[in-house]
Image: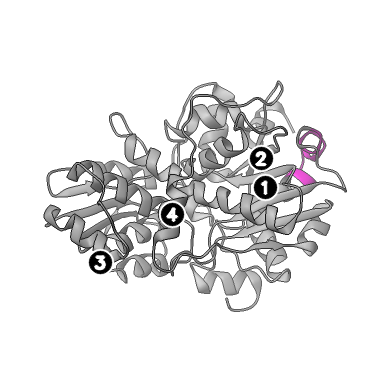
């Protein structure tokens, strides 16, 4: 394969790993989430059959199949960002609160208010859930290639679902137009003049990482030496990178970013040395990653902190889903993307370079975050060969 083909699939950063300075990274969102009714940490699971297929010693999976009754991690960002945005609008946080009814009463003076978002699935449903819990309306913009099952799930939260004839990026642009006195946009994407809410989304995802710290400590095991994380606009990947590039860490794990080959905006940006957008249509089955460009918040963090990035074909995601299912871990297409990236690093055309850069050996302990369960049950059953549990 030529250099152009290699650049479509792989990026390797030169130079030693270094801490990222100047980024806010505390556990305030973690404390907030733990106060919410129904909070429970998501499980940390061993995946021995998948580890064997990867040729490594151990694979840990943080399984985000269920968060506050939703089938993905996105509610962590949506809940924290909504809370912080409301507090900014009101001018203060609630003096005290113990229930969601307390939060709804605190935010009631802002009614009538509609929460608006664009989504390729899980973020929009999470924003709609927060709107319903707080007594607000919700309007969610979706690209026209979103499956009927995902649209129906968003509508089931009481949201108005608006189909945009175009890509996810087109849906984002449409949602931005709604901002006004009675419409609050809760987006995980950025655009000029709109960065604070997406920054809060990233902070919200930090709960996953603080839970992992507690879980590895409780198990008495060393933290992973390789961490794989999927990239859409890059919010989750930015949270992961900030966490594992903290100045206080004595040893920093290798970080592998993963994108669909059909929507590899971060990969193209890394090779260009600046943010660029890859044109649609973005049609990967990893629907949550069908984004043409990284966010302006994620770009500086990921370009400085990732050790490598791979773009994977859809078949890698299917393979990862089947392997995880054999380990008893239900993962949707987007959820399995981190493992798909590890499979590409272990067995793909550029495996030698990637294994060397990441330190993947028969003794390596790796971590992947399965960010969703079977959000499209019919597709899951077709790929895995059995119904979702």
The local crowd at label 4, few if under 14, some if 14 to 19, many if 20 or more residues have their Cα within 10 Å, is many
Part of the protein shown in magenta: 345-356
Quickly name the residue at label 4: 76
Quickly name the residue at label 1: 341
Q: Earlier in the sequence, mark 4 or mark 1?
A: 4
Q: Which mark is residue 315?
A: none
Q: Earlier in the sequence, mark 4 or mark 2?
A: 4
The local crowd at label 1, few if under 14, some if 14 to 19, many if 20 or more residues have their Cα within 10 Å, is many
Dots 2, 3 in contact, CB < 8 A: no
Whether residue 132 appears in this view of the structure is no
Quickly name the residue at label 2: 256
Q: Earlier in the sequence, mark 2 or mark 3?
A: 3
Mark 4 → mark 3, Cα distance in angstroms: 19 Å
Query: Relative to the observer, which residue lies in front, 70 or 341?
Result: 70
Q: Which of pointers 2 and 3 indicates the residue nearer the eye?
A: 3
Q: Is residue 237 magenta?
A: no
Dots 1, 2 in contact, CB < 8 A: yes
- Secondary structure of the residue carrying numbered label 2: strand
Mark 2 → mark 3, Cα distance in angstroms: 41 Å
- Secondary structure of the residue carrying numbered label 3: helix
Q: Main secondary structure of the magenta part?
A: helix
Q: Residue at x 84, y 52 (%)?
A: 55
The local crowd at label 2, few if under 14, some if 14 to 19, many if 20 or more residues have their Cα within 10 Å, is many
Mark 4 → mark 2, Cα distance in angstroms: 22 Å
Q: Residue at x 57, y 48 (%)?
A: 209
Mark 3 → mark 1, Cα distance in angstroms: 42 Å
Q: Where 302 sits versus 145, above or below?
A: above
Quickly name the residue at label 3: 101
Quadrant location of residue 98? bottom left
Q: Earlier in the sequence, mark 1 or mark 2?
A: 2
């Amino acid at each position: 394969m030529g250099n152009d083909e290699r650049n479509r699939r792989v990026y390797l950063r030169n130079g030693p790993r270094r801490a990222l300075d100047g980024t806010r990274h505390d556990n305030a969102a973690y404390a907030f989430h733990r106060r919410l009714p129904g909070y429970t940490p998501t499980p940390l699971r061993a995946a021995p059959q998948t580890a064997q297929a990867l040729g490594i010693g151990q694979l840990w999976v943080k399984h985000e199949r269920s968060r506050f009754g939703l089938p993905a991690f996105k509610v962590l960002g949506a809940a924290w960002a909504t809370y912080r945005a409301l507090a900014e609008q009101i001018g203060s946080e609630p003096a005290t609160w113990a229930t969601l009814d307390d939060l709804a009463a605190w935010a009631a003076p802002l009614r009538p208010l509609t929460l608006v978002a664009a989504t390729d699935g899980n973020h929009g449903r999470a924003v709609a859930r927060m709107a319903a819990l707080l007594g607000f309306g919700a309007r969610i913009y979706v690209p026209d290639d979103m499956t009927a099952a995902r649209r129906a799930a968003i509508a089931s939260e009481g949201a108005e679902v608006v189909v945009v004839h175009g890509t996810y990026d087109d849906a984002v642009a449409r949602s931005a137009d709604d901002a006004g006195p009675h419409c609050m946009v809760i987006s995980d994407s950025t655009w000029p003049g709109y960065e604070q809410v997406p920054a809060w989304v990233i902070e919200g995802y930090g709960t996953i990482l603080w839970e992992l710290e507690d879980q590895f400590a409780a198990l008495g095991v060393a933290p992973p030496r390789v961490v794989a994380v999927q990239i859409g606009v890059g919010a989750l990947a930015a949270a992961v990178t900030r966490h594992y590039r903290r100045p206080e860490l004595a040893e920093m794990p290798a970080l592998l970013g993963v994108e669909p080959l059909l929507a590899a905006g971060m990969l193209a940006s890394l090779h260009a040395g600046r943010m660029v957008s890859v044109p649609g249509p973005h049609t990967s089955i990893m629907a949550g990653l069908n984004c043409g460009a990284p966010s302006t918040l994620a770009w500086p963090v990921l370009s400085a902190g990732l050790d490598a990035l791979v773009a994977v074909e859809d078949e890698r995601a299917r393979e990862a889903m089947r392997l995880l299912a054999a380990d008893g871990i239900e993962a949707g297409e987007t959820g399995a993307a981190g493992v798909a990236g590890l499979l590409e690093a272990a067995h793909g055309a550029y495996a030698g370079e990637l294994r060397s850069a990441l330190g993947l050996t028969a003794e390596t302990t790796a971590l992947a975050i399965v960010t969703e369960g079977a959000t499209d049950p019919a597709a899951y059953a077709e790929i895995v060969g059995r119904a979702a549990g």
